[in-house]
Image (cartoon, grey):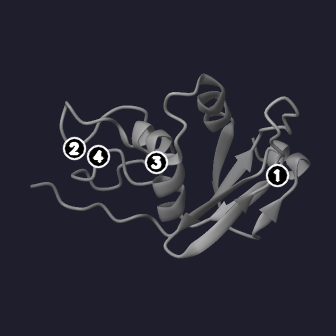
């Protein structure tokens, strides 16, 4: 049995690069819930969330790449593969299924348009502020 990895004491800025889509009658905003808290990811804006929320909602992992190795660098990207078992879908796919987006190519593309930055600081960021961080 593998040990459960703890998340580091950081915050994650989730930047929603989705633009409003008139054809699909979508503002580009998406509201998601984690641990009883509702997060509104507005179109073309960044929102700071705990690393656990970034993992649960978007499969963005800030935990160490190798938990058995001391001072292992953080993963700091989306885990697109791997589940608990080789037959299991990845957590990334699990999130798409949970949102009802797994079989819709347009919505899968929407899900790809979230960017992540590990940081400390304030709660919301403009597009320009996020661009300066890259």
User: Relative to residue 30, is residue 9 depicted above or below?
Assistant: below
Bin the neighbour count of mark 3 within 10 Å (Cα to Cα): few under 14, some 14-19, many 20 and up.
few
- Could you tell me which secondary element the residue under label 1 belongs to? loop
The image quadrant where one finds the N terminus is bottom left
Residue at the extreme left: 1
Bin the neighbour count of mark 1 within 10 Å (Cα to Cα): few under 14, some 14-19, many 20 and up.
many
> Label 3, label 4: how many angstroms apart (C-alpha)?
28 Å
Q: Position of residue 85 (x, y in %)?
A: 18, 38
- Could you tell me which secondary element the residue under label 2 belongs to? loop
Q: State if disc 3 and disc 2 touch (CB < 8 Å).
A: no
Bin the neighbour count of mark 4 within 10 Å (Cα to Cα): few under 14, some 14-19, many 20 and up.
few
Residue for badge 4: 66
Q: Position of residue 100 (x, y in %)?
A: 52, 41
Residue at the extreme bottom: 36
Q: Nearer the viewer, residue 109 or 99?
A: 99
Q: State if disc 2 and disc 1 touch (CB < 8 Å).
A: no
Residue for badge 3: 98
Q: Nearer the viewer, residue 34 or 116?
A: 34
Identified at 47% across, 54% down, the residue is 55
Residue for badge 2: 84
Residue 49, image quadrant? bottom right
Residue for badge 1: 45
50 vs 84, left or right, is: right
């Amino acid at each position: 049995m593998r040990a459960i990895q703890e998340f580091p004491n950081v915050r994650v800025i989730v930047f929603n690069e989705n633009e409003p889509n008139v054809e699909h009658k979508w503002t580009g905003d998406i509201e998601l819930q984690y641990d009883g808290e509702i997060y509104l990811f507005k179109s073309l804006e960044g929102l700071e969330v705990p690393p656990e929320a970034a993992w649960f909602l978007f499969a963005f992992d800030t935990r160490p790449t190798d938990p058995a190795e001391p001072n292992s660098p953080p993963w700091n990207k989306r885990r697109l593969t791997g589940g608990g078992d080789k037959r299991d879908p990845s957590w990334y796919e699990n999130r798409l299924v949970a949102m009802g987006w797994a079989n819709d190519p347009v919505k899968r593309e929407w899900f790809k348009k979230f960017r992540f930055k590990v940081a400390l600081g304030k709660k919301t960021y403009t597009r320009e502020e996020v661009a300066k961080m890259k």
